Image: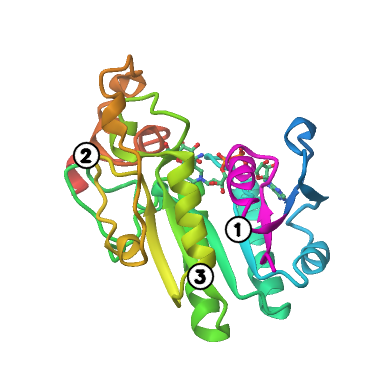
């Protein structure tokens, strides 16, 4: 029998792509705060605001694993991030504990480590260095996943996603890109493999990657795509207006609102 999976953020760009790729293998229910009718053929869909704990408790019953992708995906006011990313993520983990959901695959982000210099190669053990309120909320997500794995045995699989698009559109993506198919492969590993708690990087097999992905490879991840194939495309150079963006891995997420002294940051 197909495993029952819940995808949050199902009306969004990645949630919808994941549904289309993974629904052959799993029985998937999608949920979101809003509808996106044209994308919902064959999808069992429930409207739910993840801020509402009672509703979250209801929709996570009899679910094997949650693919938690519902959130604000960019920088916003702290209040909005607190409600839609932090409180909503707490509700998901707490409901999962009560309903004995086995695993949570959490859409973390490269903005958890955005304040690292681009010259630095990172692995999954490096300290978090968030670049925004948004990145901070993803730090919370990774940490609540650790707590709920250790204390309540809800297995946690955090994917620090780089930039998931059909193809790279910006020069930074030559390092950070992940194709939708490679992302779906990682999510599938999160559903089907044995682990307690993992952080992996959501990147394709990019020649210019900043991140070592040993933990993902150990679980069987074999990325099929490489951003280098698009290096000769006419990629945008938006970041070129900001030296700060160009220096740090988080790019414009670092430079927007930056008010520090670059030479003080190693
Ligand atoms: P998106 O904005 O297209 O999808 C997010 C969905 O979450 C939206 O449909 C939105 O309605 C829903 N949502 C927001 N607040 C909600 C709430 N309170 N209750 C229920 N649903 C709510 O964003 P995208 O690009 O699909 O991102 C999906 C996830 O992946 C996000 O968590 C994002 O932070 C993460 N991510 C995405 C990356 C990318 O390259 N697209 C990179 C790194 C992380
Ligand atoms: C993210 O976390 C965002 O959700 C996405 O919109 C992109 O900006 C991506 O990171 C990125 O860093 O390219």
Q: Find the residue positioned furthest to the bottom.
A: 151
Asked whether the viewer can see residue 140, the reply is no
Report which residue position mark 2 lands on.
Answer: 207
Say which mark, if any, is on residue 67: 1
Identified at 41% across, 32% down, the residue is 256
Give left or right: position of 232 versus 128.
left
Q: Is residue 118 above or below residue 199?
A: above
How far apart marks 3 and 1 lie (CA) works out to: 10 Å
Label 3: which secondary element: strand
Find the magenta span and give its range.
1-28
Q: Nearer the viewer, residue 63 or 159?
A: 63
Label 1 secondary element: strand
The residue that appears at 76% across and 72% down in the rendered structure is 62
Considering every residue shown, the one lying at the far top of the view is 234
Disc 3 target residue: 156
Left or right of 106 on screen, residue 121: left
Q: CA gap, disc 2 to disc 1?
A: 28 Å
Q: Is residue 232 left or right of residue 27?
A: left
Rendering coords of residue 219 (x, y %): 37, 66
């Amino acid at each position: 029998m197909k495993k029952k999976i819940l995808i949050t953020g199902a009306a969004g760009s990645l949630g919808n792509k994941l549904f289309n790729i993974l629904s052959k293998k799993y029985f998937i229910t999608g949920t979101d705060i809003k509808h996106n009718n044209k994308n919902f053929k064959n999808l069992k869909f429930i409207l739910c605001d993840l801020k509402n704990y009672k509703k979250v408790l209801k929709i996570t019953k009899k679910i094997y694993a949650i693919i938690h992708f519902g959130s604000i995906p960019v920088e916003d006011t702290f209040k909005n991030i607190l409600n839609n990313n932090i409180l909503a993520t707490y509700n998901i983990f707490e409901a999962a504990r009560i309903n004995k959901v086995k695993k949570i695959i959490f859409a973390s982000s490269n903005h958890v480590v955005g304040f690292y210099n681009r010259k630095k190669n990172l692995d999954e053990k490096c300290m978090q260095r968030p670049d925004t309120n948004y990145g901070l909320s993803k730090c919370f997500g990774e940490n609540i996943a650790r707590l709920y794995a250790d204390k309540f045995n809800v297995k946690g699989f955090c994917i620090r996603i780089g930039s998931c698009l059909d193809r790279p559109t910006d020069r930074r993506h030559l390092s950070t890109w992940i194709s939708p198919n490679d992302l779906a492969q990682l999510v599938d590993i999160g559903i089907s493999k044995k682990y307690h708690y993992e952080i992996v990087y959501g990147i394709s097999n990019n020649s210019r990657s900043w991140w070592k992905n040993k933990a993902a490879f150990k679980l069987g991840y074999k990325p099929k795509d490489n951003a280098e194939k698009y290096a000769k495309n006419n990629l945008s150079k938006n970041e070129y207006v900001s030296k700060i963006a160009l220096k740090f891995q988080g790019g414009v997420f670092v430079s927007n609102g930056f008010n520090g002294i670059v030479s003080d940051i190693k």
